[in-house]
Amino acid sequence: MSAPSEPEKYSIDEMMDRLKVHPAEDPLHEGQLVTRDDGSQAIRVRKRKRRSRQPHKEELQHSRRARIVQVSAALILLLLAIFAAGAAIIFANSAPFRKGLIEKITLSTGANVELEQFRVNPTSANAGRIVLTWPETHLLRDLSATSVRAEISPASFLGKSMTGEEAISSEGTLTIRIPDPAKVAQNARSTAESLPIRFKRYAIPKLHILLGDPAAPLIRLQNSEGSFHPVKANGRPQLLLSRGNLVITGWPKLRLDRSHIEFRDNELDVVGMRLAYDTDTRGVFELSGSVAPYAFGHPSTLAVELDSFLVAGIAGPELGRLFSGRIDTLPSDTSNHLSFTPGPRPNTSLAVTFRNTLTTPFELNGFPFLLVLARTLDDDWFERPVSESDVTGMLRRGDGAVAISDFNFEHKGRMALRGGVTMAADRRLSGSLEVGIAEGMIRASIPSSDSRRLDAMFGPSMEGFRWISLKIGGTAAAPADNFKELLEATPKQPKKPDADRGNPTFEDLTAPK
C-alpha cells in the first residue's frame, strides 16, 4: 500500500524523473546498470554463490569415491584371480605338472604309475584310467581304475602335495599276490599325513579283488563297493567293503554282505566280515580276527560264527542235499575257526561245531538204505527222515575235502543215526554211519519175511534202538551203502510160532493170514 503523500499512479515521465532524482535508493554496488536496446535501463545483479558448508553432501561424495575405489580394487583382484586360476589350470594340464603328479603318486604308493587322459578343472582332477603296478617284493600286484575323479583343494595346483576330500573311480580291479617268502618282503607303511597325495576317502563303487594268479585266482570278489579311509580316529587305515559275489576255489557260491578291515603295522584286523550263501538271505557266516600275511609258516586264525546258515553253504550243494538244514555254531575251544598259513599254498582249513537251527527242520535224504527201510518198514517217513530234537556234529573243510563227523541225529520212536561222511575233492564219498531203528518199529513189522531178516540183521537193543553199522561210498551225486547187501546176506528167518513169541500183539492179531 503506497504512502498517502504519494500519488497512486505515475506516468512514464514521472517514473523516469523519479529514478533520476533518487538513484541512491538502489545502489549500483549491488549490481551493474545496463541500457537495453530500446533505451531503457536496468540493474543487472550478479548471482551470488552459496558459501555455507554442507557436511552430509560432503560425506555422500566421499562415500561414493570410496565405493568406486573398492569396486575398482575388487575388479582388479577378480581379474588377477581369474588370471592366476587360468594360469594354474593351464599349468596343471601341462606335461610338467603331470610328470610331477606321477612322481607324487609313486612316492605315496611305491608303485609304477600309468596315467591316461589326465585333465584338471577348477574343482577336480580327472583321469580316464590309472594303473598302479607294484614290484614283486610287495604284497599288492596291481590296481587298475577307470573314470577317476578327485575333488582337490586350490593349494593342489601349485603346492608340493595334492589334497582333497575324496577320490572316486567308477570301476577298479585290485590284484593281490599270494605271499611268497622268497620274494615278498614286509612293507613299511608311511604316515598318511606325510604323503604328497592325501585324500580323506578313496572309493570304488564297482570293485573287483583277485587273490593269486589273475588267470586262475584262489579268491575272487566281484562287484563289491569299496571305501578306503587312510586316517581314522584310532589312527589306523580302514577298508570297508559292501556287497559282492565271493568265489573261492572249491567252495560253494558265497556273497559278501559287508566287511570292516583295519590295518595295523604289517597285520590286518578283520573287525567283521559277514557272508551269505548264494541267494539265501537268512543265514549268516561271520568272520573276525587278525591276519599276519608276512608271518610265513605261522597260521592265521579267524573266529567263525554261524547263524541259521545252510549246510550246503559250507559243505556244497551235493553234500548239502544228503544233510539238509540250517545250523548254528556251538561253543567249542577246539573248533569254530578258519585258519590258513601264508605262503604259496595257504592250506586253508575250516572247522565248525554245529547244532541245527531249532526253528527249521533238519533232513536226511538220498542214501539208499533210507529207501530200503521205508519199503521194509512200510513207512514213507524213512525216505526223508526229519529230526524233532537237536542235531549236532562237526563240519570240516580242507584240501578240497568236506567232512561231517561226530554226527548225531535222532527221532524218538523211529530212528537214530551217528557217525560221519567225507566227500573228497573228486566228489567221492567215504565214511560209516551207525543206524539205529526203534525196537518197536522192528517188532511191529516182523510178520513179513524182510522184516524178520531186519530183525535178525540188527543188533541188540541199546538206548531204545537196535543198531547196525553201514559203510558209505559212491559219489555225492549217487551215494551208495552196503545196507541192501547186508540184508540179502542175512538168511531168511522162519516165522516164529505164537507160543515162542508170547502173547500176540495187536499187529499179530490184525495181520492178514
Image (spheres, rainbow, N blue to C red):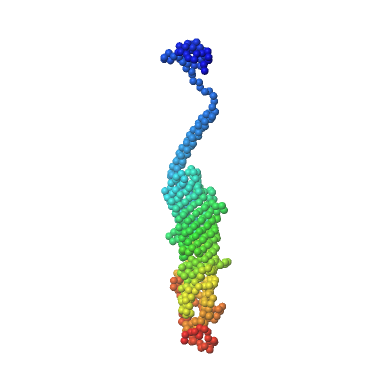
Q: Residue at x 46, y 13 (%)?
A: 11
Q: Position of residue 217 (x, y in %)?
A: 45, 61
Q: Position of residue 117 (x, y in %)?
A: 42, 48
| Residue furthest to the right | 333
The reply to whether residue 411 is visible in this rendering is yes
> Of residues 407 and 68, which is closer to you in this image?
68
> Of residues 210 and 172, which is closer to you in this image?
172
Q: Residue at x 47, y 75 (%)?
A: 383
Q: Residue at x 49, y 84 (%)?
A: 510
Q: How many marks?
A: 0
> Of residues 383 and 36, which is closer to you in this image?
36
The reply to whether residue 16 is visible in this rendering is no
Q: Position of residue 344 (x, y in %)?
A: 48, 61
Figure check: 319 above or below 61: below
Figure check: 378 above or below 24: below
Q: Residue at x 51, y 80 (%)?
A: 441
Q: Position of residue 96 (x, y in %)?
A: 44, 44
